[in-house]
Image (cartoon, rainbow, N blue to C red):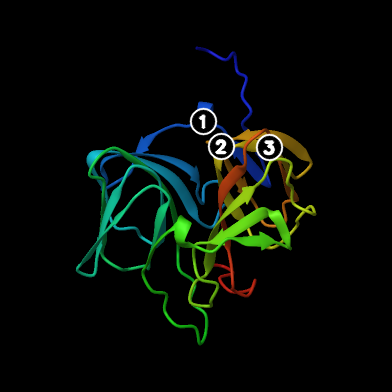
Amino acid sequence: MHQLGATRSSSKPDHLLQTPDTFVRTPLPGADGVEVIIHASPQLGARFTQMTAEFVAGGSLPPAPAQRFIYVLDGKLEIKIGGKRRVLSTDGFAYLPQGAPHTVRAPGMARAAVIEKPYMAAAGAPAPETLFGDEDDVASVPLMGDHALRVRALIPDCPAYDFAVNTMTYDPGAALSMVEIHVMEHGLLMLEGGGIYRLGDSWYPVHAGDFIWMRAYCPQWFGALGKKPAKYLIYKDWLRHPLEGIGA
């Protein structure tokens, strides 16, 4: 049904809210049986790429030109790397280092969030290792002591890794305790529930399925609304000096 040009989506210099009614699916070179929604990319001004990959049975992704993080939204994915095979179910995740040959295949229909970023090495830091995990096995930590707002860190907080991916879960009525303005940029996929997001000087209702990109120093705040918890998957660049990578 035509919406006569109406949408909650909004694109501004320091942020993007992309709602499912505006998603455009496209093939990815080298992929077979997969369509992707490219939410964030260098064309937007982002220094990473975030996609939702939609697999038919037998669909596969080629190796990435950068380090890759995968979070399974629905179904199962089979990942082969270094002679090993792992099967990830819903809420399972994997980190695959840049340059590591690997394959990603779906035995049946599946969806996954895929984040890719050129790796930025740090002096004295070890090389990152391949990671596999399940979100339920990651400890939940209250944010700033607030037990109504819980964080799970899916990538180790150590210098080998130059970005972080977390899930954040808000009980109904929970909210960030401050408006954040910081050097990190974000990619955020709403997984469950909804609420109100402040981005820059704009306030948006957001729901499960929405994607948000925030440029560095974009004012940001979220409060959960409704009768069930709100949850999102959030990326940020991390653990590198701001001058590293300038001009790259």
Q: Which residue is mark 1?
A: 20
Say which amino acid is labelled 2. Answer: Asp
Q: Residue at x 51, y 51 (%)?
A: 42
Q: Nearer the viewer, residue 172 or 14?
A: 172
**Which secondary structure lies at badge 2?**
loop
Instruction: Please say if the residues under marks 1 and 2 sit with CB atoms less than 8 Å apart.
Output: yes
Crowd tier of the residue under label 3, counting other residues whose Cα lies within 10 Å: few below 14, some 14–19, many 20 or above: many
Residue 155 percent across, percent down from the top left: 49, 66
Say which amino acid is labelled 3. Answer: Gly
Q: Residue at x 75, y 36 (%)?
A: 203
Which marked residue is nearer to the observer: mark 1 or mark 3?
A: 3
Residue 157 percent across, percent down from the top left: 55, 72
Residue 146 percent across, percent down from the top left: 73, 57
Taking 143 as reference, is 229 above or below it? above
Crowd tier of the residue under label 1, counting other residues whose Cα lies within 10 Å: few below 14, some 14–19, many 20 or above: some
Crowd tier of the residue under label 2, counting other residues whose Cα lies within 10 Å: few below 14, some 14–19, many 20 or above: many
**Mark earlier in primary sequence (3, 2):** 3
**Which secondary structure lies at badge 3?**
strand
Instruction: Please say if the residues under marks 1 and 3 sit with CB atoms less than 8 Å apart.
Output: no
Q: Residue at x 54, y 57 (%)?
A: 47
**Mark earlier in primary sequence (1, 2):** 1
**Mark earlier in primary sequence (1, 3):** 1
Q: Determine the image quadrant of residue 205.
A: top right
Q: Which residue is mark 2?
A: 210
Taking 244 as reference, is 69 above or below it? above
What's the distance in space between the residues labelled 1 and 3, CA to CA? 16 Å
Q: Which residue is mark 3?
A: 195
Q: Residue at x 45, y 61 (%)?
A: 137
Q: Determine the image quadrant of residue 150.
A: bottom right
